[in-house]
């Protein structure tokens, strides 16, 4: 704390009052009492909410695919799917529910961003409310079930339904998109077109356009390989904003470890290990190909992969496209699966997430 | 929306409390075991141990299942993986005693890393990121265990990721950043800041809130570079203003903490913030909100801006600060007084602004009756109001009408009390104010006032005090104003 300048009178060595601004660092003891609660929130686990007592579940038309015995835990964690559950509620409990300000809102804690709410509609078995989202609950007659984090559902006998993707359309949930989509099909198409960064050659999916573009250059572009062969530094650093380019995969990896503190064991754009079928194919082709190392082989294989049916690749490999969990289709559980794959899978196949 | 937000916060605090209680319980159990004397009957000790080992066994087998699922290549692979992940996630989501250590010992991390590979289904990414989130929420060494997963978590913040996945990854990274400086630096080196900043831009939603929270952990320093990088990122300043202007209190709270660190650590950020509308937005929030969680960072941001930039103040600011002074919350009173003391350390106009406002009666009341730490801050305000800005070397001059008025309204006893306190800084403040009174009050009234309030007595306690500065100051005042000549002309 700077209080005084050495402003001495000729007589006194007194340190006079001198007004100065006092600035404290964020961790200064001065702020400690104000920081106490914030410190508690420095780390936060995401907890599952527990039910106070089990619900009894009656199957409804839309949910006939659900197994009869579903644990309440599962019920709460059901993402984005329509279920209706009939419970017995005494008059008192109904009154309590209607009047209880405290328990206004509950969010399925698994589905925070998608805003699927477990809401309670007193005495009604009607269609679900328009829209997905807390703001859409207001004025609709839906009384949300209980507060987030509290012990829930002490009441029975109330229709519980999970809001889902509805008939009247929804806004695309992806940040900054805002597209209005009137049906599930429309949503699927929109999503595929706009929001996946998937490689058109090998169908691998990436979380950013930039990574996709790097992948395409490095894995599928023979021009890229040509420049590499002539010694140009072509391998870009993966960290946005760095801009460094290295001459080969290994030195790029080293740069990531040295400069950006990536773990040494890390592999982002690792080359796929060819399946037995592909290896055999490429071995047959071997004599016709010039020696250019593993990168060339990769390019070759990826091209061959492209010839393989996209559908079967999507459904069996683990590099299937990112799925979103919306859905009111009966034949699927939690994950959004493109129509192409659905058609492939439908006969007798069990849907993701239904098994517990 | 606010109630939901409030509930979420309550939940977090409740969970925090539960954890602490659980931790305390664990410690107590350990103590019982070691010392031999037990308040707790042996049975329940053993039962707890049993429960623990059942939990650990469940966790190990969940990790085993995951290992099998990850290695599996056939049909229904996603289902298997998601199922295994979900089981592990449930165990790790218990609010009491989550078996993080057991999961780590069983080798969960490399498996979770594999589950984060690009192109994996959303369900899988979400569950894996959730597991990692809860591992990271544990003890320091548990958070550090996430190192191999960090680049993937950062990558999945990308604009092509589905929102729930990106948010869960942001949550996990927020926990990692919350651990400490070392991990923060690693995350920044790995480029975590730009995508998190982008996630904070949307107008509402839990994603923006989680991103803001994670960013507040990421930039809290002490290295100021992250804060500077953040304020320079496109769209961030605009988003901050938007959120503080319009967003619900929960989101505004997280953003306010971001502003706290920006303004405390980065002078570049402070100058950009000061040039914007931010000051008025902070004042508006102070005026309209009653949420302590929001008021604290908003007040502090205001304080940092004022401390960093001498020009920043106006009538509205003062009014908002007065509201805080009148609050029942100790932190708000103390920090509001601090902000006022910085304003009062400014130009004469600033001092007049405060002096002529409703602040003075409140300050005087606080000076006589509030808890110590608040009294000290108020003392700074009052003293600063009475002294003109320093000009070069030499003793700063007094603002006589302020001094006279404040002394007449009874502020002197409060300062003399501070002289009596054990805190050297407070004692020094008291002595310095007494000097102003002794020097400045007209017609030689100063010494009489001081004597009347037992000031001489308070000063004499320093005659042989161990602190040399205080000793000298007290002695000088006594010698000069209460020397041999004192009282002789009466």
Image (cartoon, rainbow, N blue to C red):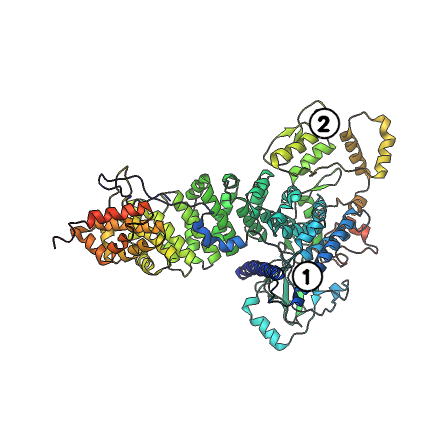
Q: In this picture, is A69 found above or below B486?
A: below
In the image, is B191 to the left or to the right of A310? left
Local secondary structure at mark 2:
helix
Residue A143's spot in the image, x, y percent?
Answer: 60, 67
Left or right: B250 in relation to B118: left
Quarter of the image that includes the N terminus of chain B: bottom right
Q: Is residue B467 above or below residue A48?
A: above
Which of the two residues, B406 or B358, is positioned nearer the viewer here?
A: B406
How many numbered marks, from 0 up? 2
Q: Position of residue B279 (x, y in %)?
A: 41, 48
Dot 2 corresponds to which residue? A223
Q: Position of residue A81 (x, y in %)?
A: 70, 59
Q: Nearer the viewer, mark 2 or mark 1?
A: 1
Q: Nearer the viewer, residue B48 or A255?
A: B48
Q: Badge 1 is on which residue?
A: B49
Q: Quadrant of residue A8?
A: top left
Instruction: Answer yes or no: is residue B447 visible.
Output: yes
The reply to whether discs 2 and 1 touch (Cβ–Cβ < 8 Å) is no
Residue B83 in view, yes or no = no
Quadrant where the image shows the C terminus of chain B:
bottom left
Q: Chain of mark 1?
A: B
Outermost residue, left direction? Answer: B489
Chain under disc 2: A
């Amino acid at each position: 704390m700077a209080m005084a300048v050495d402003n001495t009178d000729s007589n006194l060595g007194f340190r006079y009052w001198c007004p100065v601004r006092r600035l404290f660092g964020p961790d200064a003891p001065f702020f400690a009492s104000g920081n106490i609660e914030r410190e508690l929130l420095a780390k936060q686990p995401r907890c599952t909410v527990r039910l106070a007592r089990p619900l009894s579940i009656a199957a409804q038309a839309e949910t006939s695919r659900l197994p009869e015995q579903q644990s309440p835990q599962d019920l709460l964690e059901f993402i984005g799917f329509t279920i209706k559950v009939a419970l017995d509620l005494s008059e008192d409990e109904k009154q309590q529910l209607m009047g209880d300000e405290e328990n206004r809102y509950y969010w399925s804690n698994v589905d925070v961003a998608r805003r699927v709410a477990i809401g309670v509609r007193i005495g009604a078995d009607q269609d679900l409310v328009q829209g997905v989202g807390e703001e859409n609950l207001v004025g609709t007659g839906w009384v949300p079930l209980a507060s987030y984090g509290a012990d829930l559902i002490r009441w029975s006998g109330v229709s519980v339904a999970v809001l889902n993707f509805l008939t009247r359309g929804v806004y695309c949930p992806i940040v900054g998109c805002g597209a209005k989509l009137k049906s599930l099909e429309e949503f699927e198409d929109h999503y595929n077109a706009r929001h996946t960064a998937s490689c058109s050659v090998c169908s691998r999916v990436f979380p950013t356009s930039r990574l996709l573009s790097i992948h395409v250059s490095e894995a599928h572009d023979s021009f890229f390989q040509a420049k590499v062969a002539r010694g140009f530094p072509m391998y870009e650093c993966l960290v946005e904003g760095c801009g460094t380019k290295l001459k080969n995969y290994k030195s790029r990896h080293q740069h990531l470890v040295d400069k950006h503190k990536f773990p040494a064991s890390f592999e982002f754009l690792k080359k796929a290990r060819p399946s037995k079928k592909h290896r055999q194919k490429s071995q047959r082709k071997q004599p016709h190909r010039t020696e250019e190392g593993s990168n060339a082989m990769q390019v070759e294989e990826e091209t061959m992969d492209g010839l393989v049916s996209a559908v079967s690749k999507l459904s069996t490999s683990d590099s299937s496209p990112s799925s979103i969990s919306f859905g009111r289709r009966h034949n699927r559980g939690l994950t959004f699966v493109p129509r192409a794959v659905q058609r492939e899978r439908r006969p007798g196949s069990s849907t993701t997430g239904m098994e517990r | 929306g606010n109630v939901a937000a409030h509930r979420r916060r309550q939940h977090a605090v409740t969970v925090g409390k539960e954890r602490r209680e659980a931790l305390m319980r664990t410690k107590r159990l350990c103590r019982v075991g070691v010392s031999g004397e037990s308040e707790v009957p042996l049975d329940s000790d053993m039962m707890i141990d049993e429960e623990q080992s059942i939990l650990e066994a469940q966790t190990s087998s969940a990790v085993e299942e995951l290992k099998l699922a990850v290695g599996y290549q056939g049909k229904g692979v996603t289902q298997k993986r998601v199922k295994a992940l979900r089981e592990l996630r449930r165990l790790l989501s218990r609010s009491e005693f989550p078996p993080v250590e057991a999961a780590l010992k069983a080798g969960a991390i490399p498996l979770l890393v594999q589950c984060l590979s690009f192109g994996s289904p959303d369900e899988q990414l979400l569950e894996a990121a959730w597991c990692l989130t809860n591992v990271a929420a544990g003890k320091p060494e548990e958070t550090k265990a996430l190192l191999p997963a960090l680049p993937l978590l950062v990558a999945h913040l990308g604009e092509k990721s589905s929102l729930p996945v990106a948010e869960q990854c942001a949550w996990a990274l927020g926990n990692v950043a919350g651990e400490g400086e070392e991990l923060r630096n690693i995350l920044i080196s790995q480029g975590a800041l730009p995508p998190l900043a982008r996630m904070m831009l949307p107008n509402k939603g839990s994603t923006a809130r989680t991103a803001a929270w994670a960013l507040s952990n990421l930039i809290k320093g002490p290295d100021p570079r992250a804060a500077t990088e953040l304020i320079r990122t496109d769209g961030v300043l605009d988003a901050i203003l938007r959120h503080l202007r319009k967003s619900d209190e929960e989101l505004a709270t997280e953003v306010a903490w971001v502003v706290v660190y920006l303004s405390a650590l980065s002078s570049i950020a402070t100058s950009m913030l000061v040039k914007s509308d931010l000051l008025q937005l902070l004042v508006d929030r102070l005026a309209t909100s009653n949420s302590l969680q929001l008021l604290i960072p908003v007040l502090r941001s205001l304080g940092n801006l004022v401390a960093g930039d001498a020009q920043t103040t106006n009538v509205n600011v003062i009014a908002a600060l007065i509201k805080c002074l009148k609050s029942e919350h100790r932190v708000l009173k103390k920090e509001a007084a601090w902000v006022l003391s910085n304003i009062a350390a400014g130009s004469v106009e600033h001092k007049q602004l405060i002096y002529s406002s409703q602040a003075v009666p409140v300050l005087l009341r606080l000076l006589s009756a509030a808890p110590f730490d608040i009294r000290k801050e108020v003392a700074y305000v009052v003293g600063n109001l009475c002294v003109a800005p320093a000009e070069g070397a030499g003793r700063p001059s007094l603002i006589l009408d302020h001094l006279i008025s404040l002394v007449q309204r009874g502020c002197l006893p409060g300062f003399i009390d501070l002289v009596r306190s054990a805190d050297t800084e407070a004692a020094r403040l008291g002595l310095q104010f007494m000097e102003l009174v002794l020097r400045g009050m007209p017609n030689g009234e100063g010494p009489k006032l001081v004597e009347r309030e037992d000031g001489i007595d308070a000063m004499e306690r320093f005659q042989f005090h161990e602190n040399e500065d205080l000793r000298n100051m007290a002695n000088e005042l006594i010698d000069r104003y209460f020397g041999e000549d004192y009282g002789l002309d009466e």
